[in-house]
Image (cartoon, grey):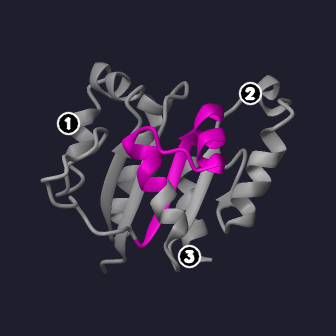
Amino acid sequence: MTRGLLGLVASGCGGVEIWFRKDLAEPAAQRGWRLAITLTPTVVPWFEEAGELDKLQALTDLDIRWTPRLPSQPKPYPTPDAVIFAPASANSVAKLALGIGDNQALTALNEAIGVEGCKVVVMPQANADKRRHPMWETHVATLTGAGVVVVTDEAPGRLLDLLDT
């Protein structure tokens, strides 16, 4: 059964290159999602060094994105039906809450938040020091107020279950 297009977005947080494919992308594909994978520029070399980029690409017929398209190029895929941003660095959470789209991943996420009916799930990966920053709770509240589901301490594979609720 095909569920639709699922945007999977990852930023540079420790360990992502180890679990992202096995614990999130592969289970999503097995559940029938067509994957639109977008990465922040920082994390691309991590996936390349771990030999994961080609393995991720094998899970989707769509190009993995991290660079913006040129004005003359068509949009590479339609707006996803749902998006999971995991892991989301503290830096990316702050930018997303402020509507800053300074890389392809954040641009795609900002657009998805504005699409009616597109469920967006964000799993921040930030240590206690970063979460104590005076703006952290404001950023999280801004995202949840916009309808984003922000989860903490969730196993990556369980994020897919949130799309069914």
- Amino acid at dot 1: Asp
Instruction: Check residue 127 in the rendering and tell me which mark sits there, or answer none.
Output: 2
The mark nearer the N terminus, 2 or 3, is: 2
Q: How far apart are marks 2 and 1 (CA)?
A: 30 Å
Amino acid bearing label 2: Asn
Q: Mark 3 points at which residue?
A: 164
Residue 161 colored magenta?
A: no
How far across and down, in percent of the image, does residue 67 sit? Answer: 28, 38
Image position of 86 with respect to 141: above or below: above
Q: Residue 72 carries which label?
A: none
> Do callouts 2 and 3 mark residues in contact (Cβ within 8 Å)?
no
The image quarter in which residue 134 lies: top right
Q: For the residue carrying disc 3, how many other residues have a C-alpha within 10 Å: few (<14), some (14-19), or many (20+)? A: few
Q: Distance between the residues labelled 1 and 3?
A: 29 Å
Residue 62, picture quadrant: bottom left
Residue 112 shows in the view: yes
Which mark is nearer the camera, 2 or 3? 2
Front one among 81 and 161: 81
Residue depicted at x 66% and y 34%: 90
The reply, left or right, for residue 151 in relation to residue 76 is right
Q: Out of 2 and 123, give the one closest to the viewer.
A: 123
**Mark 1, other Cα within 10 Å: few <14 / some 14–19 / many ≥20:** few
The C terminus sits in image quarter: bottom right
Can you tell which mark lies on residue 54? 1
Q: The N terminus appears in which quarter of the rendering?
A: bottom left
Q: Position of residue 88 (x, y in %)?
A: 58, 40
User: Tag 3, which secondary structure?
Assistant: helix
Residue 37: x %, y % from top left:
33, 50
Q: Give the range drawn in magenta.
A: 81-109
